[in-house]
Image (cartoon, rainbow, N blue to C red):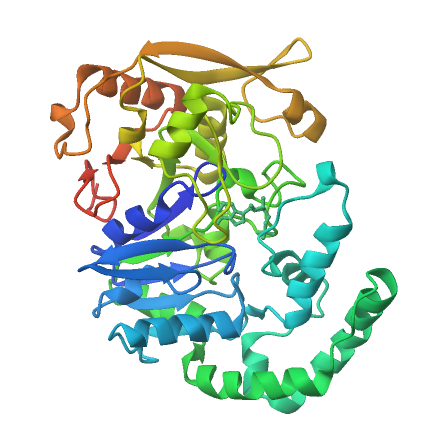
């Protein structure tokens, strides 16, 4: 029995989908604990393409049980669309295989509207660049204790009552502050009634199910979304998402005790990317030849929004922050093949900010924006490594790069990925195996 958490170590888009898919093979349960349909990944299995935003991709394995914890925010229509999308491809998901926490909050239509309205009125340099999915406003209601939860779908009179109370405030904001149309409670209820009926069989107590699974000796994989630097407390605030993306939230976001966690794997790209606004010290400009190389070769466009990702060199400051904040026991290094063909590769070892050395991301956003990376240069490699399946077959320069990455971060890779295909992944140590 082992419980393993997987988190993004940078600003999201580290290739979690592929690593989670690999580790899912060893797990019995796959659980999401935070975020919502701001996340997304695409998997191609047996020639069929599947896009996931909310349901763990582990659902593709008939013998796995998937759960969506209380820390996740759920747009019920998106969830149903995803179930329908799976059904169209021949995968009908039964309630025995998908459990949704009764305490997970519902993303309501006004959350999406408020997300867009808030971003719309911000000055260009203040915009967060959110995904527009209503994530922030939904978490605001959760913390403000005015949110509607999955469990409320099982009690429509209560749902109506809570909705009416919430709409009073939301409609005031929408009409008076943002000059938009108000929402009609009856229309929302009419929209939600069939969704409630459809989702009711899936709603339950995730904490109890996971505890029983653990006691029965099952392997549990906790799948994080976004990345460490997007954590609402520890990331580059305010240019972050609205949830805790770090490992501790795997416990809070599901009701699973930290005492039972065995490993925390950080997924880290061999270089760095970021979508949306905010500090990114090792960013290369769009005109820079290396930046263009990473963008093009790495296909750096978001799965959820299709936005161009900003690209830059590997940043050991970000890596060591992730090691500390998550307690990483292993790294999954992804997209190493994208660096092939560069004469020289660089890694930032620390920053200089106004004459001071920083070995961690400055908490002050002004300082984080001013951070100047200090680079170490290494020889690159010209070989195409996408076909390599054994660590020792990697070119010496590639292995030197990985060694340096391990030295600087203090954590060894357990997975190295060299291409988009399922097979293009080397599992150096299985985190589910006893140590
Ligand atoms: P929100 O999560 O939609 O509120 O967006 C807040 C910030 O997090 C924006 O900069 C987004 O681009 C970023 N973000 C949200 N989800 C993801 C993700 O899955 N990958 C990368 N960035 C994300």
Residue 101 locus on image (x, y percent) = 48, 71
Q: Nearer the viewer, residue 224 or 382?
A: 382
Residue found at x 45% / y 78%: 204
In the image, is 274 to the left or to the right of 82? right
Q: Is residue 215 visible?
A: no
Horizontal placement of 95 versus 35: left or right? left
Q: Quadrant of the C terminus?
A: top left
Position of residue 171 in the picture relative to residue 342 (left or right): right
Of 226 and 282, the residue lying toward us: 282
Q: Is residue 114 above or below residue 339?
A: below
426 left or right of 277 in image: left
| Residue 182 location (% of width, % of height) | 78, 74
Which quadrant of the figure has residue 372?
Answer: top right
Position of the N terminus, as image quadrant, is bottom left
Q: Farthest right residue?
A: 176
Query: Which residue is most to the front?
Result: 287
Task: State whether residue 149 is above or below residue 14.
Answer: below
Provide residue 354's location: percent of width, then percent of height. Answer: 69, 12
Q: How many marks?
A: 0
**Toward the viewer: 62 or 282?**
282
């Amino acid at each position: 029995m082992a419980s393993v958490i997987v988190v993004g170590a940078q600003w999201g888009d580290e290739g979690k989908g592929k690593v989670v898919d690999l580790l899912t093979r060893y797990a019995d349960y796959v659980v999401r604990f935070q975020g919502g349909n701001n996340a997304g990944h695409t998997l191609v299995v047996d020639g069929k393409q599947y896009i996931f935003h909310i349901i763990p991709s582990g659902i593709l394995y008939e013998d796995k049980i998937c759960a969506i914890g209380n820390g996740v925010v759920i747009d019920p229509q998106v969830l149903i669309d995803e179930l329908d999308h799976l059904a169209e491809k021949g995968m009908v998901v039964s309630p025995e295989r998908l459990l949704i926490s009764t305490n997970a909050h519902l993303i309501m239509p006004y959350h999406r509207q408020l997300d867009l309205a808030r971003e719309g009125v911000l000055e260009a340099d203040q915009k967060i660049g959110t995904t527009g999915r209503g994530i922030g406003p939904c978490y605001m209601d959760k913390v403000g204790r005015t949110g509607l939860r999955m469990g409320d779908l099982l009690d429509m009179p209560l749902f109506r009552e809570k909705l009416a109370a919430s709409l009073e405030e939301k409609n005031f904001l929408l009409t008076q502050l943002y000059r938009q149309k108000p929402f009609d409670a009856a229309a929302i209820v009419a929209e939600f009634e069939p969704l409630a009926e459809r989702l009711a069989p899936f709603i339950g107590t995730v904490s109890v199910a996971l505890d029983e699974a653990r006691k029965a000796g099952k392997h549990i994989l906790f799948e994080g979304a976004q990345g460490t630097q997007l954590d609402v407390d520890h990331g580059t605030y305010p240019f972050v998402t609205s949830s805790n993306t770090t490992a501790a939230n795997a416990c809070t976001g599901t009701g699973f005790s930290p005492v039972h966690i065995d490993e925390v794997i950080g997924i880290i790209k061999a270089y760095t990317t970021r979508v949306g606004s905010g500090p990114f010290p090792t960013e290369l400009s769009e005109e820079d030849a290396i930046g263009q190389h990473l963008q093009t070769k790495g296909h750096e466009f978001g799965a959820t929004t299709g936005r161009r990702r900003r690209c830059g060199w590997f940043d050991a400051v970000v890596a060591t922050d992730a090691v500390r904040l998550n307690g990483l026991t292993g790294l999954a290094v992804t997209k190493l093949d994208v660096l092939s063909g560069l004469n020289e590769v660089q890694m930032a070892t620390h920053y200089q900010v106004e004459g001071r050395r920083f070995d961690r991301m400055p908490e002050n956003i002004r300082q984080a924006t001013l951070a100047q990376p200090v680079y170490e240069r290494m020889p690159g490699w010209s070989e195409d490594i996408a076909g390599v399946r054994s660590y020792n077959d990697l070119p010496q320069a590639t292995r030197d790069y990985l060694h340096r990455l391990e030295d600087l971060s203090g954590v060894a890779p357990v997975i190295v990925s060299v291409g988009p295909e399922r097979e293009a992944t080397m599992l150096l140590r299985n985190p589910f195996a006893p140590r």
